[in-house]
Image (cartoon, grey):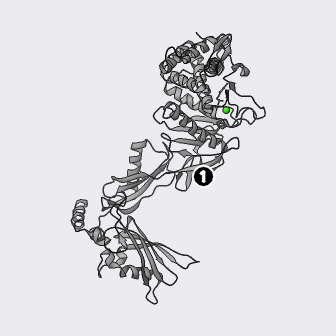
Amino acid sequence: MQKKLATLLAGILAFGSLASVGTAAELENNGAPSDLFSASSILTLTGDTFTAPAGISSEGLVWAYLDSIKDKFNLTAKDDIRSYFRITAQETNSETGTTHYRLSQTISGIPVYGADQTLHVDKNGTVTALIGSVIPDAVQKISLNSAAAALLSDKDAILAAEKDAAAVYGPLGEAEVTPKADLFYFLVDGQPKLAYKTEVNVLEPEALRIRYFISAEDGSVLFKYNILQHATGTGTGVLGDTKTFQTTLSGSTYQLYDSTRGKGIYTYTAKNKTSLPGTLLTSTNNVWTDRAGVDAHTYAERVYDYYLSQFGRNSIDGKGLLIRSTVHYSSSYNNAFWNGTQMVYGDGDGSTFIPLSGDLDVVGHEITHGVTEYTSNLEYYGQPGALNESFSDIIGNSIENDGWLIGDDIYTPNIAGDALRSLANPTLYGQPDHYSNRYTGSSDNGGVHTNSGINNKAFYLVAQGGTFKGVTVTGIGRAAAVKIYYNALVNYLSTSSNFSAARAAVIQSATELYGASSAQVTAVKNAYTAVGVN
Ligand code: L5Q
Ligand code: ZN
Ligand code: CA
């Protein structure tokens, strides 16, 4: 049946019905057709006034007008204009008295997708304009006479769309909007195919809102496209600052989802519970008041941009890996972490910490744990664990690029000037700054947050320079230093690397980037010697 219809249509179209429609002065062909509406013509009839015969109803006027311009659709006296159009809406402006109608072109009562028009009747009952798209009369006429029957049910169409999306993106989570499927004639290469329009709208495995046109004859995907829209959100951060960031409009709801970076940056709330990832944050007006969410999202974007611009790295895995963060984890939770798949931030108890996503260096620290896992994969225990922590501090601190402290913006809100750690002077916060003073117990995974001070101090000396324990280091600047350390992290270190291996790795990295006899290599050697690592 499909084949027969197609053959018939091709034959009629060869006579050039499009051109005949286009010859009417006010009716012009769409010269640059979109893919979707490739065979429809843009119809604009203005100044061609038509006044109601006396005593006619308002809808009657619409039909009488369309009947009077039948020739523009190449219809003849015997064709009933009401078989070709449907009035879908009407509204009268109480100030101007103009009634605005919405019409849809139909084939056997089934609307043609995109073939919609508006028709306007002024307060005097005069038709002032007809504006919209129509498909070629011949296509319409033939289709009317040999309309295909839908072989597929709407439920089958929904299943076909879900199956297609799952094949591309993986198993789909629960639908955000109860799926429905509406029957249309959808133009494929200018020919109307009976199709269901439906939508896959889920948040898992990622935010998707895909419009599908599913063939009502065989269930195949005729056309599909993403209908999520980019937007710029405005919000208040943890410290009360106003900032902008990328969000996504899905239907009438904005999501804290940035689709412009890699495979996306998504920010969720755990609502002070502990199940992850929790709920994607949303807003009705794109003005965001969840301060922890605003900062987790904005700073994840900043960290993504830093890695891409400074190191040419596309996200955590170098291949655009989706970046997911969850804020309001647990209750009064005084920490933040990378759990192997996402970032998680507590709100703090309000005296030790305020929400931990409120500090760019902390967000950079957590995301760098992800980078480490995908590269050197430094074991999170003992010396490799301390190096893992240190590289997170070094890169997180360098992204913020404002002094040498870690966590200063979110730590102890009632005590000014302190921080979680200092790269310049680790001993201020209970960390060793020399290998001889390393912690050798088993607490904190063998002192990962303690012994990181040794490598942090070495980085500080490389970047800033200074004389430490009698060894003078000429600083090479933070930009060169962080470039060397990043290259060491992703290309030279491995799972069980200890401090001695780190010295070798950073020297080799500096040698690769600046040459064996460079000032940069000398700085690295002197810095590790100063902190007792040889
Ligand atoms: C730590 C990450 C950050 N957490 N966790 C002790 O336990 C200890 C320190 C940390 F978000 F606070 F920075 O650094
Ligand atoms: Zn850490
Ligand atoms: Ca900071």
Tell me where residue 289 appears, x and y as whole percent. Answer: 66, 48
Instruction: Describe residue 75's horizontal placement relative to residue 275 as left or right.
Output: left
Does 331 sit above or below residue 250?
above
Point out residue 54 in the picture as x, y percentages from the top left corner: 45, 90
Quadrant for the C terminus in the image: top right
Q: Quadrant of the N terminus?
A: bottom left
Residue at 57% in and 13% down: 525
> Within 10 angstroms of label 1, few (less than 14), some, or many (20 or more) residues?
many
511 vs 300: above or below: above
Q: Amino acid at mark 1?
A: Asn
Give the image quadrant in which the ligand numbered 3 is located.
Answer: top right
Residue 372: x %, y % from top left: 53, 26
In this rendering, the count of numbered labels is 1
User: Can residue 36 be seen in this snapshot?
Assistant: yes
Q: Is any atom of residue 440 visible in this view?
A: no
Residue 297 image offset from top left, x and y in percent: 59, 41
Q: Which element carries disc 1, helix, strand or loop? A: loop
Say which residue label 1 marks: 286
Name which quarter of the figure residue 199 lies in: bottom left
Q: Residue at x 29, y 81 (%)?
A: 78
Q: Is residue 350 shown above or below 485?
A: below
Viewer-closest of 526 and 122 = 526
Judge left or right: residue 207 versus residue 110.
Answer: right
Q: In percent of the image, x 28 and y 69: which residue is there?
A: 19
Res 27 → quadrant? bottom left
Q: Residue at point 54% right, 20% down?
A: 379
Please say if 131 is above or below 285: below
Foreground of the two, 326 or 391: 391
